[in-house]
Amino acid sequence: MDDSLMARAAALRGQPLWDVPSADIIDRKRLHDLTSGDETLSRELLALFFDHSALALRRLREAADQTSRRAAAHALEGSALAVAAKGVALSAAMIAGLPENVAEGEWLEAVTELHAQVAQTRAAIAHLLAEDAA
């Protein structure tokens, strides 16, 4: 981690979750509304999503057909919406909506985008959850 990012993380440590500046990865206002401001519940949901997203990506990669792919993408979309992770939700919805006869290149491009969104979101969640450990 570069020094400026570490300095920023240190400056944010101790602030309530809702006061951490949004990077448009997780809509913190929406998460606040979804959990009625319960910060403990928000952190639990984020931790669950952190774990579930890795499993959902594996199910998506291992899916044998488009129906299985859609189901895995739809499950990930629902999880992302529950924690207000807009980018993941949009990417997963796009995959869930791909036609049965989607070209392999289009499928790979969509999955690559979803992986990038999940990685970015997991990094943001790790940062937020690390505040509790400090």
Image: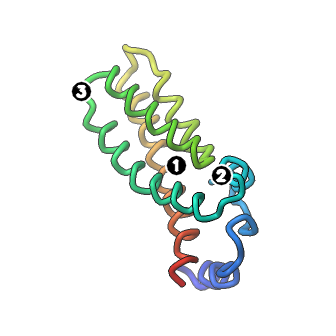
Q: Which type of secondary structure does the marked residue at label 2 adopt? A: loop
Q: Earlier in the sequence, mark 2 or mark 3?
A: 2
Task: Left or right? Give the position of 107 relative to 19.
Answer: left
Q: Nearer the viewer, mark 2 or mark 1?
A: 2
The residue identified by callout 1 is 117
CA separation, marks 2 and 1?
Answer: 23 Å
Looking at the image, do the residues carrying marks 1 and 3 touch, with CB atoms under 8 Å apart?
no
The disc at residue 64 is: 3
Q: Earlier in the sequence, mark 1 or mark 3?
A: 3
Q: Position of residue 94 (x, y in %)?
A: 52, 29
The residue located at (42%, 49%) in the rendering is: 53
The residue located at (59%, 85%) in the rendering is: 3
The residue located at (50%, 22%) in the rendering is: 97
CA separation, marks 1 and 3?
Answer: 23 Å
Amino acid found under the numbered disc labelled 1: Gln
Q: Residues within 10 Å of mark 3 (few under 14, many from 20)?
A: few
Task: Left or right? Give the position of 92 relative to 58.
Answer: right
Placement of 27 over or under 44, stated as above or below: above
Looking at the image, do the residues carrying marks 2 and 1 touch, with CB atoms under 8 Å apart?
no
Q: Quadrant of residue 17?
A: bottom right
Q: Quadrant of residue 68?
A: top left
Q: Nearer the viewer, mark 2 or mark 3?
A: 2
Placement of 18 over or under 106, stated as above or below: below
The residue identified by callout 2 is 35
Q: Which type of secondary structure does the marked residue at label 1 adopt? A: helix
Q: Earlier in the sequence, mark 2 or mark 1?
A: 2
CA separation, marks 2 and 3?
Answer: 36 Å
Amino acid found under the numbered disc labelled 2: Thr
Looking at the image, do the residues carrying marks 2 and 3 touch, with CB atoms under 8 Å apart?
no
Q: Which type of secondary structure does the marked residue at label 3 adopt? A: loop
